Image (cartoon, helix red, strand yellow):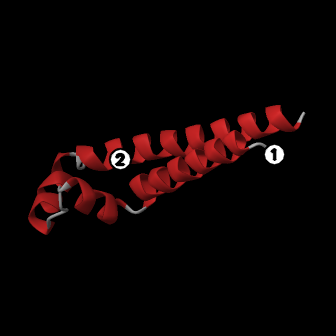
Amino acid sequence: MPVHVWVIDLFGVALLIVGFTMAFRQDVARRIIGKPHTPAASAAAKEEGGDPLTYILRIAGVMLMVFGFAIGLMFTLFNLS
């Protein structure tokens, strides 16, 4: 396979890792962006329906995971055909 295919595949894997971290390892993602999950804020947020950042990280993380997988798979399969 050509080098540009490997570069796109590595980019797709990087997006998969970042998306997984955002969606399922939110404590790490919150530390990276500087918004720690405090116990006092979480108790108040549970009464109001949840922390909005939690849902934003989940949705954006899953979207990045799917995009990374799709771009890597489509580009690789196109070049293998």
Choose between 36 and 41: the one closer to the eye: 36
Residue 32 x, y percent position in the rendering: 26, 58
Residue furthest bottom in the image? 39
Choose between 35 and 3: the one closer to the eye: 3
Residue furthest front in the image? 3
Q: Amino acid at mark 1?
A: Met
Mark pair 1, 2: CA separation: 35 Å
Q: Quadrant of the N terminus?
A: top right
* Circle 1 SS class: loop
Task: Report the residue marked by disc 2.
Answer: 57
- Badge 1: residue crowd in 10 Å (few <14, some 14–19, many ≥20): few
Choose between 13 and 45: the one closer to the eye: 13
- Badge 2: residue crowd in 10 Å (few <14, some 14–19, many ≥20): many
Residue 34 x, y percent position in the rendering: 17, 56
Choose between 70 and 45: the one closer to the eye: 70
Q: Amino acid at mark 2?
A: Leu
Task: Report the residue marked by disc 1.
Answer: 1
Residue furthest right in the image? 81
- Image: 57 above or below 25: above
Residue visible at 41% across and 47% down?
58
**Which one is earlier in the sequence, the residue at label 1 or at label 2?**
1
**Left or right placement of residue 17 versus residue 54 in this view:** right
Indicate the quadrant where residue 74 lies.
Answer: top right
Q: Which mark is residue 38?
A: none
- Image: 23 above or below 28: above
Residue visible at 17% across and 55% down?
35
**Left or right placement of residue 26 versus residue 38 in this view:** right
Residue visible at 12% across and 55% down?
44
